[in-house]
C-alpha cells in the first residue's frame, strides 16, 4: 500500500529506480547479502568478504581474493550479473531521468482538470448550437 493505493509490481520497480534513497538501500542490501553468502561459502570473515564484494562489484578485481568453492563462484556470478544487468542500468536510468524530465509538463491531475474543462466547453458549445 502506498498512500492508500495498492501498487502493482512494475510500479514498485519504477518507484525503486526513481528514488535515490531506495536505490541506494537496495544496492547496499544486495552488496551485504552477497558478502554474507561469500563469507559462508568461502569460510572468510565478513570484512574480507565485503572487501571482495566491493572490488568485484566495481569490476576492479585485484585478484587478491577470489572464490574457490562452487558456492562462492555462484555468488560471484550473481554479484557480477546483478551489477551489470540490474544495478548499473538502474543507477544510469535514474540519473538520466533526472536530466531529461520536462519540468514544464502538465501533471496527471492538471491533465485531468483540462480534460474536464474541455468536456464542459464542448457541452456548452453543443447547447448553443441547438
Image: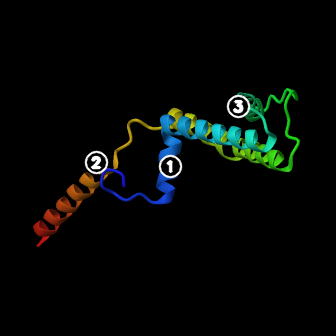
Residue topped by disc 3: 50
Residue at 83% x, 30% y: name it: 61
Circle 2 — which element? Answer: helix
Residue topped by disc 2: 110
Residue topped by disc 1: 14
Which of the two marks, 2 or 3, is nearer to us in this view? 3
- Sequence order check, earlier mark of 2 and 1: 1
Marks 2 and 1, how far apart at CA: 22 Å
Marks 1 and 3, how far apart at CA: 28 Å
Circle 3 — which element? Answer: helix
Marks 2 and 3, how far apart at CA: 48 Å
Residue at 11% x, 73% y: name it: 130
Q: Nearer the viewer, residue 111 or 53?
A: 53
* Residue 24 horizontal side relative to residue 51, left or right: left
Q: Nearer the viewer, residue 57 or 69?
A: 69
Displayed quadrant of residue 41: top right
Q: Position of residue 77 (x, y in %)?
A: 79, 46
* Residue 34 horizontal side relative to residue 122, left or right: right
Which of the two marks, 1 or 3, is nearer to us in this view? 3
Give the number of callouts: 3
Amino acid at each position: 500500500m502506498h498512500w492508500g493505493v495498492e501498487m502493482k509490481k512494475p510500479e514498485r520497480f519504477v518507484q525503486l529506480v526513481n528514488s535515490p534513497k531506495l536505490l541506494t538501500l537496495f544496492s547496499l542490501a544486495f552488496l551485504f547479502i552477497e558478502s554474507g553468502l561469500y563469507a559462508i561459502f568461502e569460510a572468510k570473515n565478513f570484512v574480507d568478504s565485503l572487501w571482495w564484494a566491493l572490488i568485484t562489484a566495481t569490476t576492479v578485481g585485484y585478484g587478491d581474493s577470489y572464490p574457490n568453492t562452487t558456492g562462492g563462484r555462484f555468488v560471484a556470478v550473481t554479484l557480477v550479473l546483478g551489477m551489470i544487468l540490474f544495478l548499473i542500468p538502474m543507477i544510469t536510468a535514474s540519473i538520466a531521468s533526472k536530466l531529461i524530465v520536462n519540468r514544464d509538463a502538465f501533471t496527471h491531475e492538471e491533465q485531468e482538470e483540462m480534460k474536464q474543462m474541455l468536456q464542459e466547453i464542448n457541452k456548452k458549445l453543443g447547447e448553443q448550437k441547438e
